[in-house]
Amino acid sequence: MPEVYDPLTDPAPAHDLRAVLRIRAFRRLWIAFGLSSLGDWIGLLALTAMAKAFAGDDYQAANFAIGGVLFLRVLPALVMGPVAGWVADRLDRRWTMILGDLIRAAFFVTIPIVGTLTWLLVATVLIEIVSLVWGPAKDASVPNLIPRHRLEAANQLSLITTYGSALPAAALFTAITLVTRWAGDFSIDLAVYLNAATFVVSGLAIVSVAEIGRTPGHEHEEHPTLWRTMVEGWSYVTGTPVVRGLVVGISGAFAAGAVVIGLGRTYVEDLDAGDPGYGLLFGAVFGGLALGMGFAPRLFSGLSRRRLFAAGLVGSGIGLAGLALIQQLEIATMIAVVLGFCAGASWVSGYTLLGLEVPDNVRGRTFAFVQSAVRTVLAVTLAVAPFVAGAIGRNTVNLPGDRSVTYNGASMTMLIAAVLASVIGLVAWRQMDDRPGVPFWRDLRRSFGKTPGVYPTTGLFIALEGGEGAGKSTQAALLVKWLEEQGQQVLLTREPGATDLGKTLRQIVLDPATGDISHRAEALLYAADKAEHVDSVIWPALKTGAVVITDRYVDSALAYQGSGRDLDLTDVERVNRWATDDLRPNLTILLDLPPKSGLGRFAERDRIEAQSADFHERVRAAFLELAAAEPQHYLVLDATLDREQLAAKIQERLLPILPKVKP
């Protein structure tokens, strides 16, 4: 009898995308979702091309028709978003998605059959209304199909699929229009029919996912209206500089991509590239967007999230300017990939920062505000950009010597948007730069000098990190007791002071009588403790299959000696990685607590605890930044919670990754 795959006992890391796809129900839903996304992108390309054909050769009329299609694709989300979510929560999700796919397929088939611009616009609205119900039904179904510890990886896969599917959609659209160019307008009709076919296949795939059903329970959360959501979030967003900068920047990143999509059809016509050129440019932008979302944080890990966010905005502006000034399709395509990559980097960094910067009690409203703001920006940009381009039109300026320069509305509008995006990026950089005085290029070089690290494959290595008074010792003791009840072999250790050498070093660095010493000397003393600790305590225990829990590890050195002492973070990290032979914890549990609360939990203070409030604030910010850089290896918890609540969250996170207990 073949072995049945059990996702709960899969030893793969929680962030492993392949482990998520091994779950049969989710894999089939993902295939359906991918086909629906593919159909959405093909539909966008085909409908804008069809709108252009219906409008004829008039430059302004063509831009207005394209702008109308793009605006109507976003408009239903502004008006019916909350209602669609309410509907999706009260219907059988599986049949909602099946019928939604079939209905969208039917609407697409009717568009070339009716063959009028009016019906194209009406059908666009109806298709988007159905999509608004389909999307929440899909999103609400995912958590019921996979273990909770793999939800983050599933969401990442969904995000990459959403934007990454634009690339094969563009390739299919380009191939169809190239192969069937002899057929004239029928080549666009063929693309629409292919789009309808993807929805039919998606619906058939969902038929086999029996695990999807009706929303459990009878109590339903009230969905606020768009206006109420915007009003509730506005006061917090406008009153918090960092969050205000993030919202403006995220909206700017979306606007940069929307300008290219809104003007792309006219832009490629100005280059005499036609439908194939439009598909190529479209795929380049969204392919770059998917790459930026998926790889930018890891590729540029030497940059803080705030720096990566602002740098991505500036890069988007530069990319837009390049598209506006370059009149050669091949080069423009490469620039479009870079533009999409930069916008994707800003998008994912901005959302990560919002999750860290916004307090839990207002986080939901703030994210709802961001979603509303992004939709509004998309709607305005997609509608206004083609109209501005149409108003500018084609113009020729005569120069001395029988020379002339021709400029078109699409390029000029892109250039205006490029200037605005660059200004937004520079303002965000000035307001949000968390490493003033440190050259940007130094951080950039550091990104390409990082190594992936060594993660234990026998045993389990856990580090408890956090500021003073966060409760690490309490949680360590509770964790040891729970692990022993699970039958695990456990070793609890700490830094500094777990070895004979470490005890001497601990006395030196923590005793107030030591007084002021060189910051570099202090960093080296901590590194020496780590070297002895790893070689004589941690590695030997891991090799026996034990669960090793350390109270503080390398992150403390980076936070305290790097950010707290304001030493060059690259130097501190290099020394500590070398001292530990680049051994890294499988999971770092960060107990996050405001320094004022933590330091108030005890009266007497050692040499480190006695540092200034600014010192401890920098330490806290550094811990959060480290966790944001590699979320798959971190569990960040609010240390103001009761110790039992914290212990339960830690146990829930660890249970799926514990070593198997030998009988």
Image: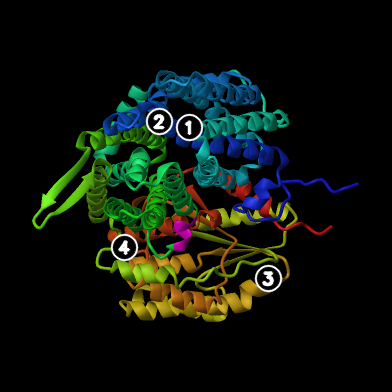
User: Where residue 541 is drawn, which disc sits there?
Assistant: 3
User: Where residue 267 is drawn, which disc sits there?
Assistant: none
- Residue under the image location 59 percent in, 70 percent down: 454
Residue 543 image point, x, y percent: 70, 71
How far apart are the two marked residues, 4 and 1, measured between alpha carbons?
A: 67 Å
Tell whether position 438 is magenta: no
Q: Name the residue under label 4.
A: 615
Q: Which of 335 and 303 lies nearest the eye of the viewer?
A: 335
Tell me, yes or no, whether the two marked residues, 3 and 2, touch with CB atoms within 8 Å.
no
User: Where residue 53 is drawn, which disc sits there?
Assistant: 2
In terms of sequence position, does the residue under pointer 2 or pointer 4 come before the other?
A: 2
Residue 109 is left or right of residue 393, and the answer is right
Image quarter of residue 12 = bottom right
User: Where residue 185 is drawn, which disc sits there?
Assistant: 1
Q: Main secondary structure of the magenta part?
A: helix
In terms of sequence position, does the residue under pointer 4 or pointer 1 come before the other?
A: 1
Q: Element at badge 3?
A: helix
Looking at the picture, which amino acid does disc 2 mark?
Answer: Ala
Tell whether position 296 is magenta: yes
* Span shown in magenta: 295-299
- Labels 2, 4: front one: 2
Q: Counting other residues with Cα less than 10 Å from the Cα at mark 4, is it few (<14), some (14-19), or many (20 or more)?
A: some
Q: Element at badge 1?
A: loop
Looking at the picture, which amino acid does disc 4 mark?
Answer: Phe
Q: Counting other residues with Cα less than 10 Å from the Cα at mark 3, is it few (<14), some (14-19), or many (20 or more)?
A: many
- Labels 3, 2: front one: 2
Image quarter of residue 621 = bottom left
- Residue under the image location 32 percent in, 35 percent down: 377
Q: Which of 39 and 402 lies nearest the eye of the viewer?
A: 402
- Residue under the image location 26 percent in, 55 percent down: 429
Residue 613 is left or right of residue 570, and the answer is left
